[in-house]
Image: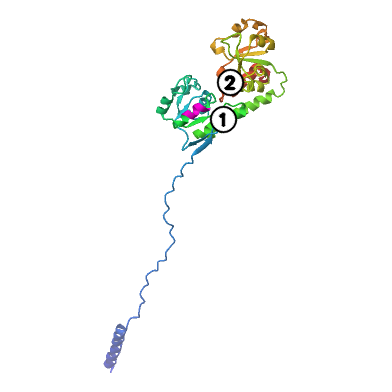
Amino acid sequence: MQKKTYILFSMIIALGVFAAACAPSPEVEPTKAPVLVPTDIPPTSEPTKEPKPEPIIVTDDLGVEIVLKNPAQAIISISPSLTEILFSVGAGDSLIGRDSNSMYPENALEAVDLGGMWDGIPVEVILAMEPDLILAGEIYSAEAIAELRELGLVVYWQANPVTFEGLFDNILDISVLTGTEDQAVEVVASLEDRFIALQTKLKDVDELPLVFYELDASEPANPWTTGAGTFISYVISQAKAQNLGDSLAGAWVQISSEELIAQNPDVILLADALYGVTPESLAERAGWSDISAVVNGEVYGFDPFILSVPGPRLVDGFEQVVEILHPEVNE
């Protein structure tokens, strides 16, 4: 009996195991593929295009519009004042040609010397140099400039200044053509500060000496001087003095010894000292030894290029004239 019970129990267990083994497996849901959500990807940006430089457009003192695609890089200057301005604004390296009188600063001498222009402008030589800009001063007529322009040359004509404000404007105008405006602003600010500083020192000066500015005494009895409306006359007046030449007719005029002796200047400035004229040789002219300036030793040699060339050095000239006429203001 026990044996039958054991066998039955064993069969029940075996059937249970078999049933479990044969039972269907539970359904497993298949893994779902991940859903890809598109993201906003910015489109590839195109390379930034360099902006085209704006052309330089200015109007010169003849009223002619000048257009340059870029700042001038190959410049010919046929006026000393414009050559000096060019270097003052940091564009001297662009000077390729100059007139013979453009001798300052010293670096200007490295440019091709085109002559003194007394026999005319050397057009063929200039055309061969292929400048992108020519700078010309007031000494050249509108007709001469028009002839250059008819040949396809770009010419900027600038009038001489008659005040320091005009000088500062001239400097800034040239800097636009050369793309050196920032440096020009600094130069003008410095020159203006020096001018204003001396004006302040002179404001209480009441004594106005009479000044004779001698330009040329190749005819000693009838020397040349500068009249009203010139920058030299303006500088003398700004230095708290009277320009003797203002009483004459004309900007550049001769005066007779008789007239000069009668006016009896207090100070004589010899702009022809570089050509051998001295206070001693001046005193030897007939009747000149009695002039107050000669009697009192108030005859001075003066660098003609500082005031005769209407460039940045005009402020230097102003300072020198003040030092001669009113040295007490700098004490």
**Amino acid residing under circle 1:** Asn
Which residue is situated farthest in the bottom direction here? 1
User: In the displayed structure, would residue 301 be above or below residue 137?
Assistant: above
- Evaluate whether residue 133 shows in this view: no
**Amino acid residing under circle 2:** Leu
247, 209: nearer the viewer: 247
Magenta segment boundaries in residue numbering: 142-147
- Contact, CB < 8 Å: mark 2 with mark 1? no
Identify the residue position indicated by label 2 in the image: 307
Q: What label does residue 273 carry, if any?
A: none
Q: What label does residue 170 carry, if any?
A: 1
322, 250: nearer the viewer: 250
Q: Quadrant of the N terminus?
A: bottom left
Residue 143 forms part of the magenta stretch: yes
Q: Residue 73: x and y, percent?
A: 45, 32
Q: Going from the N terminus, do you reach mark 2 or mark 1 first?
A: 1
Q: Quadrant of the C terminus?
A: top right
